[in-house]
Image (cartoon, rainbow, N blue to C red):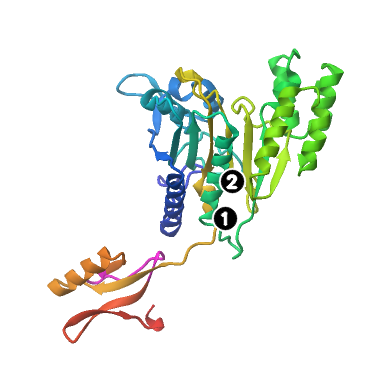
Amino acid sequence: MSAWVLPDHIADVLPSEARHIEELRRLCLDSARSFGYELIAPPLLEHLESLLSGSGMSLDLQTFKLIDQLSGRTLGVRADTTTQVARIDAHLLNRSGVTRLCYCGPVLHTRPSKPFATREPLQMGAEIYGHAGLEADLEVIELAMHCLAQSTHGLMGKPLEFQIDLGDARILPAILKGVELSNGQLQQLKVCIAGKDAPGLSEVCKSLPQHNAVALKALLELYGEQEVLTRGAVVLKDWPEALKALEQLQWLKARLNVPVVFDLADVRGYSYYTGIRFSVYTSGLSDALIRGGRYDEVGAAFGRLRPAVGFSLDLKDWVQLLARPPARRAIKAPWSEDAELNAKIKTLRIQGETVLRVLPGQDIDGDEFLYDRELVNVNASWTVQERSKSDL
């Protein structure tokens, strides 16, 4: 095997795609800034106990671990950024009011999170700390959709269409309140609900009170549009916490200008989310493009329990769905020590133009730029002229 062959599910990003990803990164961070979010840049690795504190413990198997040669302590390479943001909010900023933070950087996974996925996603996210109201949940969803709206030109030349799946992490705990379950039973229950496994769920429910079992089985059918909330209110009428969740889902749906589907049996992130959760889907991906929701307990491990809601997406996932932008227009210039030519090149670059000076013996080769113009000396003056199509 060649020494330069990369590990499985790790890949180089070549020029035109790298530029496209960078443009998406800037669009997302500029969108977050326009909403009033402050940019932070957490480190790629930390002491393991910090990364895996609280809700971060669920990422233990996804986290690469190594020994710090300075301290001898175990470090972890982040598999997600949310725990780090919670640490920054709790210990470095420690503000009393609402804090809005955004970030964008690589994370590393020991295994791909889904078929054909990279183990090195480029994660962009935004989070609000310090506000428990639905207004914060709505703002986070609106920001997520605003980011996507900045670049939606799909591979087939048609705009991407998005759908939001709404659920709530409080529904399952509400139904199970007061029911005694072993950890094994609870895990099996969640697996069956997540996989819409009706026979498996029926088997697990044999040991549960009939009242609770009927509601759990009904969850598998509570997926769809507005009627789901109507049917859900009947199924969940004996659990006030669950009914409150349905009311809040309806409140959000009424304020979103994008197709909404409800999934009351979505239990992914059950141990992480504490309230409303959402996923954004589009054609071309088998899994969600964006995931987010409320996770009010994320800061507890750092000694500061306060409301939190946010979302994240992988820019490498998103860029695969989009049409590649056309090559950037550029100007070809000869190599020369002519002072007038060099001054002209400097001026053009200050004006935002891309100017490539052709080195002696160099042949232009690349796919990121279209050299459709060139600097030529006309009557002792350097002038930008269009190049003929045959020369491109």
Which label was assigned to residue 321?
Answer: 1
- Left of 110 or right of it: where is 166? right
- Left of 339 or right of it: where is 13? right
Does residue 226 show up magenta in the picture?
A: no
Could you tell me if the residues under marks 2 and 1 are in contact, i.e. CB atoms within 8 Å?
A: yes
Does residue 361 show up magenta in the picture?
A: yes
In three-dimensional space, the C-alpha distance between marks 2 and 1, rounded to whole angstroms, equals 10 Å
Tell which circle, 2 or 1, labels the residue nearer the N-terminal end: 2
| Residue 347 versus residue 72 in the image, above or below | below
Q: Residue furthest bottom?
A: 379
Label 2 CA crowd tier, 10 Å (few <14, some 14–19, many 20+): many
For the point 64% across and 46% down, the residue is 256
Span highlighted in magenta in the image: 357-370
Say which amino acid is labelled 2: Leu
Which label was assigned to residue 289?
Answer: 2
Displayed quadrant of residue 295: top right
| Residue 340 versus residue 133 in the image, above or below | below
| Residue 145 versus residue 211 in the image, above or below | below
Q: Position of residue 309 (x, y in %)?
A: 54, 33
Say which amino acid is labelled 1: Leu
